Amino acid sequence: MNDAGRMYPEVFTPAGPFPGDSGRTVYPPRPDADGNFAFIEVLDWHTLMIQVYVQMGYMCAFLRSALSSMSIESRNRIEESVRQIERTRPIFLRTGLLLIATQQRMKDMCMVFFIESMVWAQQESSLRMTAKFFAGSPDKWLALSQAVVENHLEGQKDWRHANEPAQWVKGVTNTIARKESRVAWQAVDRSEDPDVISLEEIVESPIEGLLEQQYSFQSVAQLEAAAQEDPETAEYLSCKIRNPSWSCDAISRHLNWDEKRGRRIDRRFRRLRRKIRNLGAGIQCRDYKPPVGISEANFTAHFE
């Protein structure tokens, strides 16, 4: 970490330059030993806050213009993020020195609200660009999406409760990416893997891949009971329970099924799972992975 990073830990440090960013970093002004602020630092900060106010207005206008093409659920989620940003914007025009720390945090909050909207809008290209800025690689866009939305959907604390929201998202994104990379490498034989497996080949829609929750032991038991009438689905489910992070393609390779057969059985599995979910089978939770933000050293799991 450089000297500025040590002096201003609340300021988000990007993993790479943001496209079109050719300016200098403006840090939150701090008083000297006598409690006085440097005039030029305060002026720079207020100029930055005006820019943030304007940019957030553009972002809200952009998001509202795209709502008509969204699904009902995505539209509702994005509208809530827009409302949060619009409620926050006025604070960026206030000039009180005691508000500087709050303005710094709310600036990051608005940025993450916008990223959350991009997740619900399924804007993969934007998320890839943001992942490079946040985590150093566009390939971490799924980990970024999971870090931004998952805890909130499960009723857990997330970046909304962090003192440094952007830093929280950056840390959790890298934690998820490292874990998923380790699990994927160890779970299947990589020798015959294609260079790229698109998300659409693994799940029915991109948002499902990001947001769909796992099941409790109670619902798993009901799934297993319901699948007994279909031996192929039962075999697929058994493999999925043992290896919850495996994709349809990985399970098909493990069971020596061809691609067409594997996807046909995966569709039957998904229909069965939706049926059980609609019947209210069990409380949804995660069984085989630690909650986001908790290291494996602080988590005990049973692996079959």
Image: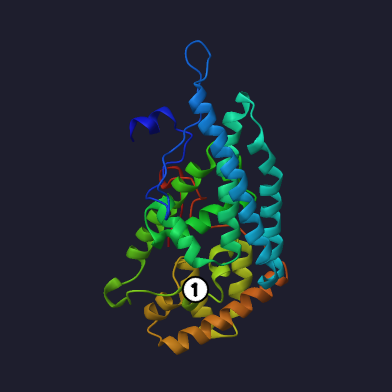
Asked if one can make out residue 215 in the rendered structure from this viewpoint, the answer is no
- The spot of residue 181 in percent (x, y) is 36, 60
Residue 229, image x and y in percent?
60, 85
Q: Is residue 263 visible from the viewing direction of this image?
A: yes
| Vertical order, 3 against 49 (above or below) | above
Is 218 left, or right, of 25 in this rendering? right
Q: Quadrant of residue 223?
A: bottom right
Q: Give the residue displayed 47% in from the left and 33% down from the top.
A: 27
Determine whether 4 is above or below 124 in the image: above
Query: SS at mark 1?
Result: helix
Residue 253, image x, y percentages: 37, 80
Residue type pointed to by label 1:
Ser
Q: Quadrant of the C terminus?
A: bottom left
Which residue has dot 1 on it? 238
| Nearer to the camera, 289 or 21 | 21
Residues packed near mark 1 inside 10 Å, few (<14), some (14 to 19) or many (20 plus): some
* Quadrant holding the N terminus: top left
Q: Is residue 89 left or right of residue 256?
A: right
Q: Nearer the viewer, residue 50 or 14?
A: 50
For the point 42% across and 86% down, which residue is it?
259
Q: Work out whether residue 63 or residue 230 is closer to the camera in this orientation and state it.
A: 63
> Residue 261: x percent and y percent?
46, 88
Q: Nearer the viewer, residue 77 or 283?
A: 77
Q: Which residue in the rendered view is the most extreme toward the top? A: 34
Q: Place residue 171 in its image quadrant.
A: top left
Task: Please determine whether, in this image, residue 43 is positioned above or below residue 145.
Answer: above
- Which residue is at a point 44% across and 69% down the rendered structure image? 246
